[in-house]
Every structure is written in structure tokens, then in C-alpha cells.
Image (spheres, grey):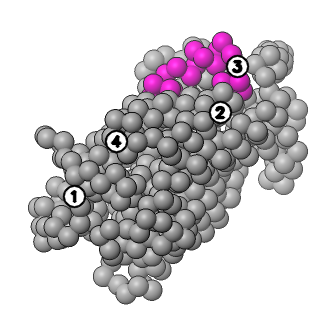
Amino acid sequence: MNSERIKLKEKIGYGLGDAASNMFWKIFSMYSLFFYTDVFGIPAAAAGTMFLIARLWDSFFDLGVGIVADRTRTRWGKYRPYLLWFAIPFSVMGAITFFVPDFGQTGKLVYAYVSYSLMMIIYSIINVPYASLLGVMSPNPKERNVLSSFRMCFAFIGSFITFMLLQPLVDFFARTLDSGAFVQNTTTAVETAISNSSVGWFWAVASIGCICAVLFFLCFYLTRERVEAVNKEENENVSVKQDLKQLFHNAPWWILVATGLASLLFNAVRDSVAIFYFRDYVQISYRMAGTGWDLTTIYFLVGQAANIAGVVLAPFISAKYGKRNTYMIAMLIAAVLSVVFFFIPNTIVWILIFQILISICAGYVLPLLWSMFSDIVDYQELKTGRRASGLIFSSSSMSQKLGWAFGAGLGGWILAIFHYNPDIMQQLPETILGERLMLSIFPAICALLAVVGIIFYPLTEKRVKQISDELEKSRNKS
């Protein structure tokens, strides 16, 4: 095993992979509910159900990807080849997902289910091995914590780029390729939201997909796999059944999956309704000169900048207070701030201030979550002799997708419960109340559930250090 220190170039290379993943993921998490209701043309409840079904079964598909990745053998390693093989399919399928066919309501719904499900499958095939790469780049927990922070920092940079580009690109292609739809959109509703031109959406997402493919190729080229299991020969012969049995007997894993699910629900519920919240509740018509950004885009950009600040601070704060304590405090503060958000004045200054504060807390949490999953890889290897990085990191991806599945599903259902209607200009007061609750009280409940879960997480900093030292001794002996 090579325990050399990871150079800055490789840390950046690793981060580029999540920049690519997150550029598309933010489109799916923050814009897809608006796209499927106001652009694609299906009811909010139907969209919510599709999100849940497609992401729910795909979440468990992640485990299969992790099992296969753990058994992959190439001259490039176990996990890196998937970045090379699936970069282009990832980008192409993303554009296909945001294509609006000229079908009837039933045909559109079938197309939405098939294209969205295929996109989630390809996302799993490239993202699970990418996440697993963290566990084999370095054996050092602190080094992995830094790599995880680079990953999340670049993930938010990728999101930032998406928010910078998507709305201007959609509006640009709408003007140049579908000008009639653009004029109709801006003259029949308050100009506070992104264009609903289907042509604009398709070409905008296709353009961002090209960037994603390049970033995945760079991630493949700049990273290396170094860590091998202590008992390499025994690992080669471990059955899938034994892998799963060992995983399901891993108590810290169960706790972290549940906690990660709650924290991702917190983000998913907030993110899915932001466009509706600004258009229906805030109702300020504004476009930034030179960029064309509306207030929703600015809100997203401010949030991503605050996320990055949280990611940058996370290694320093967790080094002093421990990952578990930092996670707990950040989610508790996020819960309190989210409750207060419901009562703030309807002014853009107050909204952006709370977006910054809440997003800093969310930025703390995500790199800690991924780093703690790498600690669980070490914990399971010490207990069983089996280093199942792909399987364990795929379970992290599973909890992420479950969070977004239920969050996006809840978004569509809650809008339907509060009588959202995309065909009217002014939503009902009860609809607007539902949108406000989805950006405040409902996420606060999810954050509190994450706090409760992390209280029971047993892998303290002291215990993680003991595990790392014991594994290092075993590797030196072998």
C-alpha cells in the first residue's frame, strides 16, 4: 500500500468529479419539479410520484453498482474506469431527460418515467465508483477528510456554475430558437422565473452536459488508487451474500444512513420549492443587468457560495470538536434558523441573510457525512477483514438518493395538497402557505431528526484513530 501524501493537483482532480456530478444533480433537485410541471406539462402530484418511484428503486440499485465496482479489476484500478466509460453517456442522457416530446399526457408520463429512470441509473453507475474512490486514495483519515472537503467544495462550485449558466442559457436558447414561447412566457405571468421554453431547456442542459463530460475525464486522469485490503486474497473470494450480511450487521452504518437520509431530506424539501416560493410569494420582478439572473438564481448562487464557506470551515471545526459533534451542532442550528425563516419579513434582504446562514450549516454537514462513511469502511475492515469500499459508499449514495426521492416526492405531493395549479397566474393563499412551510418548518423537522440520529453514532474521533492505527499495523505486518 502506498501511503504517500496526496498532492494538491490530485485533490483538485478528485474534486472535479463531484463538480460534474453536482452540476446535473442540482438541476434535478432544484429545477426538475418546475420543469415537469410548468415545462413538460404533467401534474405536480404525478411528478412527485415519479420522483419517488424512480429514485427509490434506483437507490437500491446503487448497492448493486457498489458490489460490481468492488469486484472490478482493470489496469486503472477498481473505481476510476467508470469515470472514463460513462462520462459521455451521463451527459447525453441528461439532455434526453430534459427533452419534451410531442406526445399526449399518457405518452409524456411514460417518457418521463423511462428517461428519468435511465438518467438515475447512469448517475449511479458513475457516481458510486467516484464516491468509492475516496476510500482507496489514502489510508489516512485526516487526509480523507481533506479530500472529502475538496470534493464537497468542488461540488458546490459545480452547483454555482450551473446556477450561473442554466437560467441565462435557457433564456438564450428560448430567444434564439423558440422566440414565440419566450414572448408568451414573459407576457402571461410575472417575470420572476426561468423561461418555460422546452427548446431552451433541452439545449441548456445539453450544453452543461458537455462541461460535465470534460470534468469527469479530468478526474480520471488526475487521480490514483493506492489502498488495498489487508487480506487481499481473502477479499477476492468474498461472496455478495457475505458482503451484504456483514454490512447489515454494521450498527454505525445503519445510524449514518438514517442520519444522512434526514439531512438530505432537509435539503431536498427546501430546494425543490424555491422557484415557486419566489414566483408566487416574493413576487419581485427583477433581472440582474449583464447576466439576466432572476431572484431565484441569485438566491441559489448565494446559497452555493455559503455552502462553499461551510465546506472550507468544516475540516478546521471538525478537527477541534470532532466530526460527530460538528455535524450535530450544524444541523441543530439549521433547524432553529429554518423555523425562524417562516416568520421573517417578505423582503429579499432578510431572505438572503437566512439563506446564507442556513447554507453555511448545510455546507458543514455534507463533507463530514462522506468522511464518516470512509471511517465506516475502516471499521468494517477491522471487524471482518473485508474492505468493501464500493458497497459502503454506494450505501451513502443510496441514502442520498432516498433523501432526494422522498424530498422531491414530498415536494410534488405537498404542492398538490395545497392545490398548486401551473395554469393560473396567481396561486391560492393556501398554496403559497404550503410553499412557505416547505422552505422553513418542514425542513426544520428533518434537521432535528438528523440531530437525534447522530447522537447515537459511536465512531468518535478517538475510536476512528484507534481503528486506523490497528489497520496500519496489520498492513505493515503483511
The residue beneath circle 3 is 322
Q: Which of marks 4 and 3 is in front?
A: 4
Please say if the residues under marks 3 and 1 sit with CB atoms less than 8 Å apart. no
**Residue 333 shown in magenta:** no
* Amino acid at pointer 4: Thr
Over which residues does the magenta segment extend?
A: 308-327
**On the rendered structure, is 10 left or right of 88?**
right
Which quadrant would the N terminus be assigned to in this image?
Answer: top right
Select label 3 or label 2 by which is in front. 2
SS category of the residue bearing label 2: helix
Instruction: Identify the amino acid type marked 3.
Output: Gly
- 391 lies left or right of 29: right
Disc 2 residue type?
Leu
Which marked residue is nearer to the observer: mark 2 or mark 4? 4
Whichever of labels 3 and 2 marks the residue nearer the N terminus, that label is: 3
Q: Is residue 232 above or below residue 38?
A: above
The Cα atoms of the two marked residues, 4 and 3, are separated by: 37 Å
Q: Which of marks 4 and 3 is nearer the N terminus?
A: 3
Read off the residue under disc 4.
Answer: 347
In the rendered structure, find residue 332 and report the number of the disc placed on it. 2
Alpha-carbon distance for marks 2 and 4?
A: 25 Å
